[in-house]
Image (cartoon, grey):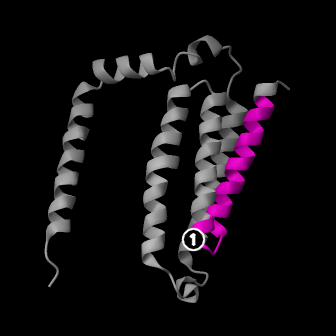
Amino acid sequence: MSFDLIIFFVLGALAIASGITTIRHKNPVVSAISLIFHFFMLAGLYLSLNAQFLAVLQILVYAGAIMVLVIFVIMLLNLGDEEKLKEKFNARKLIAISFGFILAIQFAILYFSTTGGNTSGQIAMVGSPEVIGNDLFNNYLFPFEAISLLLLAAIIGSVILAKRKVD
């Protein structure tokens, strides 16, 4: 077993553990910190897959900016009574467990059905900023600009909604 494979499995196990901690912990601040740890583990997984650009974006965008907003929202909500937030066992949990089981079966089928080819030369260039930039601005220029206009409209809409007076 190679060192890269060991690192991949360790980071994967830590990502799964931090994801479970994020979902299962009762304290929202601890869940948010666990989610930040999860984002760092995903960045490590990206690095182990030679996707350096995605790893840096994962840290900057999700672990940095998005999680600061999540922490601010948690602090502003000031959840006092956590007993009201608890749910009994219902159909949604049963459906989620069954979908999780189906997903695990699909991952097992995918893992055992792949052929072992040597694609390390092709994978090395997939996550580089040059390849992503060329692909983004050559093949996906219209969707890129459409999303930028959509985000601009969302920002303008949120500013207009925030400036409304509450009666």
- Residue 125 lies, with reference to residue 104, above or below; the image says above
- Of residue 78 and residue 19, the one placed in the foreground of this image is 78
- Residue 81 lies, with reference to residue 27, above or below; the image says below
- Of residue 29 and residue 7, the one placed in the foreground of this image is 29
Residue under the image location 53 percent in, 83 percent down: 85
- Residue 161 lies, with reference to residue 116, above or below; the image says below
- Where's residue 77, x and y in %? 43, 76
Residue located beneath label 1 in the image: 28
Q: Is 56 colored magenta in this rendering?
A: no
Q: Is residue 4 left or right of residue 79?
A: right
Q: Is 27 colored magenta in this rendering?
A: yes
Amino acid residing under circle 1: Pro
Region of the chain picked out in magenta, as a range: 5-30
Q: In the orientation shown, which residue stands out farthest toward the right?
A: 1
Which quarter of the picture shows residue 31?
Answer: bottom right
Q: In this view, does 141 lie to the left or right of 64?
A: left
- Where's residue 62, x and y in %? 48, 47
- Where's residue 135, x and y in %? 36, 20
Q: Tell how many labels.
A: 1
Residue under the image location 22 percent in, 29 percent down: 142
Residue under the image location 47 percent in, 56 percent down: 68
Regarding mark 1 in the picture, which secondary structure is present there? helix
Q: What is the quadrant of the C terminus in the image?
A: bottom left
Residue under the image location 19 percent in, 60 percent down: 159
